[in-house]
Amino acid sequence: MNAPVVAVVGGGQLARMMVPAATALGIHLRVLVESPTGSAAQVVVDAPVGQASDEAAISAIAEGADALTFEHEHVPNALLDRLAAAGVAVRPDAAALVHAQDKIVMRRRLTALGVPCPPWAPVTERDDLAAFLADQPDGTAVVKTARGGYDGKGVRVVASPDAADDWLAAAARSGGVPVLVEEKVPYTRELAVLVARRPSGEVRTWPVVESVQRDGVCAEVVAPAPDLADATRDEALAVAVRVAEGLGVVGVLAVELFEVPGAAGEPPRVLVNELAMRPHNSGHWTIDGAVTSQFEQHLRAVLDLPLGDPAPRARWTVMANVLGSTLEDLTHALPRVAALDPGAKVQLYGKDVRPGRKLGHVNVSGDDLDEVRARALAAAALLRGETL
């Protein structure tokens, strides 16, 4: 058999969750893992150890692969360009991926595409930041490092340039790479749209979801987003497709959005917050709640296979993350979770326990949103070692 081979850079839970979909489709996964005991290494047979910055290691996993893809964006662009020049199908390619790696590059391109974003500016000097702050109604703004931030890291709310002195100094030392400053958006909630695109241009979107953040980390996802105005939903979906097509994304793209009040008598609007060019936490609900999961769809897309049906299987699905635990081994809680709720679908990531770390998630589907949400949260609480 000559099964299609997909090479994946990164050995975390996203690569781990690609395995069932790859197995079902007869796809051979080859995953570059950071550690032989990491999340994906525990379940992937073909899992050489190496770092995302190691050109020899990435070249080795790409050898003979039908596509090279990623479970994180921390891969040097020049390396990907060299691989593409050598004939490797890099998906998404470096020209697209840079928009998920560099927030200033992303903001510039989205603005050029007419995609709604918060007011923003690149700053390298304290005076530039002070001027931006002076234009804000409450004198505060959000400052972000251009590269490397995730799950609330690399993000600060500041009321004075003093609060960003260390980042501005670091930017100066690195050759004047700007820091991003943008309006502290008065949003009512956070939304997300997952969209998949294949090289031939076919695009599919899942329903708009609500993402609930705690301490900058996704804690819950409700699919579809409740009480969402039709016009707001349509705008969110259109924005996601415009981004995917405008940036030439191949694979799954997560577009994280702010829902903000509309003008008097108008429905709420959306502003793009962040992008991720890979399966994403906001899409874990699709494993059990959609006809085609984000992981299967990503594999289909990077291999340029016809995309699957993203329709939901139930009226509501709620995903609750397990963030940290008092248990040394989360599997010890499985008997209690199964006894409490036989319908709760648990995914554990095989990670060592640390406070606040994403250790797994629970999906629950059904017809009553309040009940579904309560069930998902209760199961996640048991996995954190709490008593109900």
Image: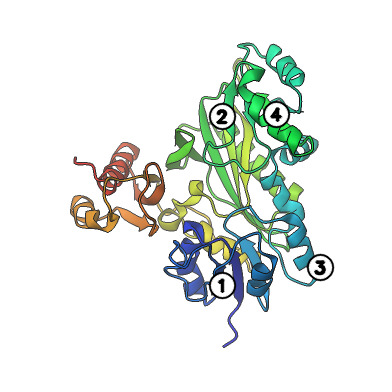
**In-front residue for pair 204/68:** 68
Labels 4 and 1: the sequence-earlier one: 1
Labels 1 and 2: the sequence-earlier one: 1
Q: Residue 144: percent from the left, percent from the top?
A: 64, 32
Which amino acid does the dot numbered 1 rest on?
Arg
Which amino acid does the dot numbered 3 rest on?
Ala
**In-front residue for pair 182/52:** 52
- Residue at x-position 43% and y-position 65%: 37
- Residue at x-position 62% and y-position 35%: 273
Labels 2 and 3: the sequence-earlier one: 3
Which amino acid does the dot numbered 2 rest on?
Glu
Rendering quarter of residue 376: top left
Label 4 vs label 2, nearer the camera? 4
Q: Is residue 180 visible?
A: no
Which amino acid does the dot numbered 4 rest on?
Leu
The reply to whether discs 4 and 1 touch (Cβ–Cβ < 8 Å) is no
The reply to whether discs 1 and 2 touch (Cβ–Cβ < 8 Å) is no
Residue 183 drawn above or below residue 136? below
| Secondary element type, mark 4 | helix
Q: Rounded to the nearest whole Å, what is the CA distance between mark 2 and mark 3? A: 41 Å
Residue topped by disc 1: 30
Q: Rounded to the nearest whole Å, what is the CA distance between mark 4 and mark 2? A: 30 Å
| In this rendering, position of residue 376 left or right of residue 278 | left
Residue topped by disc 3: 85
Name the mark on residue 168.
4
Q: Residue 231: percent from the left, percent from the top?
A: 60, 32
| Secondary element type, mark 3 | helix
| In this rendering, position of residue 103 left or right of residue 149 | right
If the image is split into quadrants, where does the C terminus sit? top left
Residue topped by disc 2: 259
Q: Rounded to the nearest whole Å, what is the CA distance between mark 1 and mark 3? A: 21 Å
